[in-house]
Image (cartoon, rainbow, N blue to C red):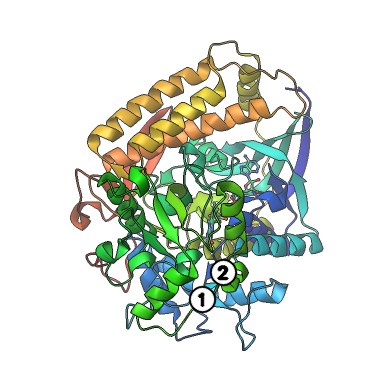
Amino acid sequence: MSKNVINHTYDAVIIGAGGAGLMAALYASRSANVAVISKLYPTRSHTGAAQGGIGAALGNLEEDRWEWHAYDTVKGSDYLADQDSVDVLCKEAIETVIELEHMGLPFDRTDAGKISQRRFGGHTNNDTGKPVMRACHAADRTGHMILQTLYQQCIKNRVNFFDEYHVVDLIRVGDSVRGVVAISIITGEFHIFHSKAVLFASGGWGRCWEVTSNAHSLTGDGAAICLRRGIPLEDMEFFQFHPTGIFRLGILITEGVRGEGGVLINNEGERFMERYAPTIKDLASRDVVSRAIYLEVQAGRGINGKNYVHLDIRPETVNHYFEQAGEDRRISAAYIEEKLPDIADFTRTYLGVDPVKEPMPVQPTAHYAMGGIPTDVNGRVVIDAKNTVLPGLYAAGEVACVSVHGANRLGTNSLVDLVVFGRRAGNQMAKFCNEVELLPLPEDPTGEVMAEFERIRKNTGETKSYELRQAMQQSMTTYVGVFRTEETLTTGLEEIKRLKSRYSDIEIDDKGLLFNTDVLETWELGCLLELAEVTTVSALARKESRGAHARDDFPERNDDEWLKHTLIINEDGTYRLDYKPVTLGRYEPKPRVY
Ligand SMILES: Cc1cc2nc3c(=O)[nH]c(=O)nc-3n(C[C@H](O)[C@H](O)[C@H](O)COP(=O)(O)OP(=O)(O)OC[C@H]3O[C@@H](n4cnc5c(N)ncnc54)[C@H](O)[C@@H]3O)c2cc1C
């Protein structure tokens, strides 16, 4: 790497230009000088891939209330969510979605011209227990529309963007932060972004697993950087497997398909979710549906004995079940093309399957990190079980854990998390920047990370990073997947440690400086390996089943001992576990009823 280091000074830097980063930037830039740093061109962020919708109890098509949304979120979280944060999420969801509408987001419309809403897993009318239409959507391109709308607003408001800059370190001095270190992907030069405040909005780490809905860029850089700089990560054992990924590829088929009436069918032609969740059926929460698919496959009822089932949205199937349920709704082929155009396109392109005429082969796919950098409801990062704030450090979006999703996230609740808490974090950060002075940089802030990049670039060894990445992804899928036991997790941990020790043996092919994705992908692999390890350590310790964390050897939820958040802290390369209480509220933990 080049020895030239280029300096920039801003009030605040935001890492990530997805929904969370852009919403925070929009608000922070009203009174502070803000830079947004993104390793991707902003509109390529994963938020743009979100399909199904953004949840808000607008009640445009039927009665709904934010308190119902809050209850569903807490119940869906298996009671691990902090209920004060959930109240903020569900209450502010309504005004925030309307704010997005006013910014110009082209939502689908009802006949009366209001924002159109559809059903989604786990969202119910609390009086009847039946699914409620709460997911606001723009066809099946809701995230794309959010990202475009927010990006346009940021450009209009003259936010400073550093596109294709890869952040590789946080400058932390004791209990303060002083900025970040980044590499310009094009030139390979190091840049210091000296600032009063830093906000991580860098997204998830689905790439730890083999079959995932996540983009290649989702390597958990922000979470790993914070972990290395002594910031704990919260609830890392909870990683969501979405039930309907395209077989083998993992590409997501939105839950909106089931929201529109699609059903899951096994090899015997049975709509098996009627057995697992008799009331809410195919719209049960994701952990429940993923486990049901896994169990059907285990029982030999996968399609043709293979490890997938069918997702059927053909009008004749859907209308048959509508009729059976006494609903007067019917769908047509044209309706599917209108409401789910991208899904129809994906399955035709990637599988040669026309969803209007054939069922789609699906299997669970690693999808969403419930855990992450712990924050309060204003996006401030907290660093211990007493919720002590680290001044100047913020996090929002998937990388953060506020915790509104607890042990399992409901569909449509991530997009709303991004905008509600992105906005709060942006506001809070701007306020902080106006109150404090810029602190000086420490001596040689780039030294450590530059040395690591030199090492990766020049190292000679036997290991290729793509081989190591594949081995890690396979281990995580096999040992730290939908179902876990003491035995699988122990084997998984040994395996990850073994792979980590091979990391120092990697030799890359590209030794140059310009656009060296080889070196950056190897550095990202280092992040993934660390996150894989802390996920496994946290999962091994939690001896119960809750939400997405399903232990075959401890099949029950155990509130007496485990109604608490996990914190994992890096202390000179070894990990220490700590726990902090869950903030309860109106809803006392109840056993799960499906
Ligand atoms: C296929 C798919 C469909 C989904 N559908 C829905 C849905 O319908 N409803 C819903 O609520 N949720 C959905 N989700 C989840 C939701 O989209 C994500 O959780 C959310 O978009 C994450 O947003 P974010 O702003 O936190 O980060 P992202 O949008 O992932 O953006 C991360 C940003 O961080 C930047 N970055 C990362 N590391 C670095 C680094 N080291 N240096 C510089 N920049 C960096 C990237 O460039 C990027 O700009 C879906 C997810 C997927 C994968």
Query: In the image shown, does 174 or 336 lie closer to the viewer?
Result: 336
As drawn, the label of residue 331 is 1
Rounded to the nearest angstrom, the CA distance separating label 1 from label 2 is: 7 Å
Residue lying at 68% horizontally and 50% vertically, measured from the top left: 44
**Callout 2: few (<14), some (14-19), or many (20+) C-alpha neighbours within 10 Å?**
some
Q: Secondary structure at mark 2?
A: helix
Q: Quadrant of the N terminus?
A: top right
- Which residue in the rendered view is the most extreme toward the bottom? 112
Query: In the image shown, does 500 or 291 lie closer to the viewer?
Result: 291
Instruction: Say above or below: 217 vs 156.
Output: above
In the rendered image, is residue 403 in sight? Answer: no
Q: Residue 453 occupies which quadrant of the picture?
A: top right
Q: Do labels 1 and 2 touch, CB within 8 Å?
A: yes
Rendered location of residue 28, percent (x, y) = 68, 60
Residue lying at 75% horizontally and 30% vertically, measured from the top left: 515
As drawn, the label of residue 336 is 2
Rendered location of residue 146, percent (x, y) = 65, 64
Rendered location of residue 437, percent (x, y) = 68, 50
Rendered location of residue 401, percent (x, y) = 46, 53
Instruction: Say above or below: 232 vs 583.
Output: above
Left or right for 497, reference 508: left
Q: Secondary structure at mark 1?
A: loop
Residue lying at 47% horizontally and 37% vertically, measured from the top left: 208
Amino acid on which the number 2 mark rests in the picture: Ile
